[in-house]
Amino acid sequence: MDPTVQSLIVAQHKAEALFAEIVSRGMIRPGVLESELSAEIHSLAGTRFGVRRHWHKRIVRAGSNTLLGYHDEAADRHIAADDIVYLDLGPVFDEWEADFGRSYALGGDPDKHRLVRDIGAAFANGKRHYQSTLNLTAGEMYDYVVSLAGEAGWEFGAATAGHLIGEFPHERAPGNAQRFQIRHGNPISLREPDANGRSRHWILEVHFVDRAREIGGFFEELLTVDAGAA
């Protein structure tokens, strides 16, 4: 297996394990501030998984804040007993970036639990679409996952649906920040190699929202790598 692919898979599996431990410890709970949970996750990542660096800020969104994306600013919110909560984690494991997003529904609201299921299903559909479409562009990938939101009765909540991932720090495009983003109209092929002929690897982000009910859900992980292959 390509060493880059192997390293990305290992990083994702470690991020999965981190999220599983967050859930098993009951850390996503009513009464805690988003910022407090973020600090607790940082501590857990360091003590249990040896994480010393995060390539992007940790995002914890709860309740109406789940309508917001990575770059949006929001007032710090206490998690409520019936909230949906999403986490966007960017730990670095042995110099390799993970980018891992999951949502968790507290309480018994069926629409919130359906939202959690729907974003996971949309990610799986998006990955199958990538695997079956040889010349897929970043713009076409974005439009596809937006269509999945509408089919499921939601709205897509962000102007982007993913980006490059790799060895820290991953490749940038100075003066053209949108070049390596999955967004409407971006003509770059998701299979275009880098300047050295090496495969690029991408993250797919799914953010579905219901603005009337003020809820959103977020799911992200590796798009271009089969993480089950390790």
Image (cartoon, helix red, strand yellow):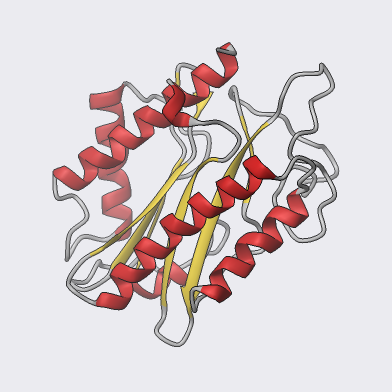
Residue 77: where, in percent of width, then height? Answer: 32, 68
**Residue 53 can be seen in this image:** no
Q: In what quadrant of the picture does the C terminus appear?
A: top left
Task: Using residue 116 as the reference point, say whether residue 203 is left or right of it.
Answer: right
Residue at position x 53%, y 62% in the image: 69
Q: Residue at x 57, y 40 (%)?
A: 223
**Location of residue 55 in the rendering, given as x and y in whole percent from the top left corner:** 52, 34
Residue found at the very far front of the displayed protein: 132
Note whether 53 is above or below 39 in the view shown: above
Quadrant of residue 62 in the image? bottom left
Residue 183 falls in image quadrant = bottom right
Front residue of this view, candidates 62 and 102: 102
Residue toward you, 23 or 192 = 192
Residue occupying the far bottom of the picture: 212
Does 115 appear above or below 86?
Answer: below
Quadrant placement of the N terminus: top right
Closest to the observer, 29 or 7: 7
Q: Is residue 210 left or right of residue 113?
A: right
Q: Which x, y percent locates residue 39?
A: 30, 44
Left or right for 109, reference 171: left
Horizontal and vertical percent for residue 143?
70, 63
Which residue sits at x=80%, y=32%? 192
Residue in view at x 69 percent, y 53 percent: 141
Left or right of 53 in this view: 21: left
Q: Is residue 65 visible?
A: yes
Exactly how many numbered labels are in the figure? 0
Residue 129 in the image: above or below residue 14:
below
